[in-house]
Amino acid sequence: MHSIPGRDRSNHGLPARITPAVSGVPSVVESLRIHSGPRVPFSVEFNPPRDAAGEARLWRTVRQFERMHPAFVSMTYGAGGSTKDRTARITGQLAQQTTLLPVAHLTAVGHSIAELRALVGSYADCGIRNMLVLRGDPPGDPLGEWQRHPDGVEYAEQLVRIVRDLGDFNVGVASFPQGHHHSPDLDTDAAFLAAKLRAGADYSITQMFFEVDHYLRLRDRVAATDAEQGAKPIIPELMPITSLRTIARAEELSGRALPASIMRRLRAAAGTGPEENRAAVRAAGIEIATEMAQQLIDEGAPCLHFITLNFAKATNEVLTNLGYEVTAAPLSA
Ligand code: FAD
């Protein structure tokens, strides 16, 4: 679907400079502009499927999202690169076989700089220009101590520079409304984010959160730290809760316990019977996500980025509640 880049194979077989990077592929920031209109653009996150059945389901979801026209779709990278080959293949297929704009998550965990450069080169070969550049979570325990690869990078900021030096890639980074769990304080955390943006990132996507105020304060802090970097899009990440089981996943991804007010609503919906009232919990979760999304729209968020867990239905319901004209075709849960 997109043109394949030419590659300079000097530097002992590693791509020294990938030129032209990936012509004709819009950057995320350009795509946000293209998708801006009466409605704030939205985008979605997929996860690498674990097996063939998961992959088949993902492709059904991908086709459903093609009809909903997200500004971009991002594909996470398993902790420690555990699903590396499948992830790279599917992300490439998203670029080559769909109408969607894929963003590849690139993480430094367990990789030397040479491997990271080769990975960027292989993504570029598939027509991928957009990368979300991350340090990555330690495998096994996302909150555990970070171990740098002996020939790798210490911070995402370094990887941003490496990717930018390789060619005309569009780079996003992670941001943390409540601060990264290893940051000493919120202001230092904002200063590190500003440094990543100064290193060449064009936007950030936040960690998932459940209090819009945290997002707004992050925006304020980055603007106060560096007004130029603060003007770059900070894309909020949302996850509609669809069952009590997804709460654990939400807490893992947000790195925090859910706020008590949200837990109260979900537990009230679940009821006191031996079985959770799944329909009511799902309705409450969709309602909470819709309220947050509306607040974010009112506050001028540049895009709404949805964690989908590889299903389209919940995102579709939230967008429909917000008045987006997205397809009403049958969707998987
Ligand atoms: P960094 O920016 O390097 O920050 C790591 C820590 O170092 C922070 O505490 C920061 O404050 C500190 N720091 C930064 N710069 C400096 C400096 N110069 N000096 C001292 N300290 C510094 N993980 C995955 O494994 N795969 C994924 O696909 C993935 N996708 C994600 C998507 C989003 C939107 C987000 C928000 C997170 C994602 N993560 C993913 C999780 C992320 O990799 C972890 O949160 C990781 O611990 C931090 O990554 P980072 O890129 O922010 O790291």
Image (tube, grey):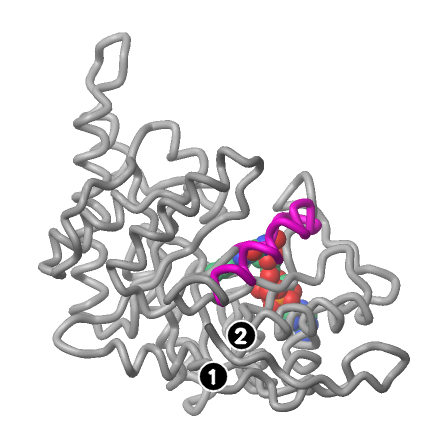
Amino acid beneath label 1: Thr
Horizontal and vertical percent for residue 68?
Answer: 24, 59
From this view, report whether residue 114 is shown above or below residue 111.
below
Quadrant of the displayed image that contains ligand 1: bottom right
Horizontal and vertical percent for residue 87?
Answer: 60, 53
Quarter of the view holding residue 230: bottom left
Q: Tag 2, which secondary structure?
A: helix
Give 51 or 150, whichever is nearer the viewer: 51
> Which residue is painted at 67% across and 52% down in the image?
84
Residue bearing the label numbered 2:
193
| Residue range corresponding to the magenta coloring | 76-95
Between tags 2 and 1, which lies in front? 2
Label 1 CB less than 8 angstroms from ligand 1: no
Give 11 or 246, whichever is nearer the viewer: 11
Give the Cα separation between the discs numbered 2 and 1: 10 Å
Image quarter (top left, top right, bottom left or bottom right) of the C terminus: top left
> Which residue is painted at 30% across and 64% down in the image?
70
Left or right of residue 122, residue 308 in this image: left
Crowding near pointer 1: few (<14 within 10 Å), some, many (20+)?
some
Horizontal and vertical percent for residue 64?
Answer: 29, 51
Q: Residue 225 carries which label?
A: 1
Q: Earlier in the sequence, mark 2 or mark 1?
A: 2
Give 129 or 173, whichever is nearer the viewer: 129
Can you see residue 181?
no
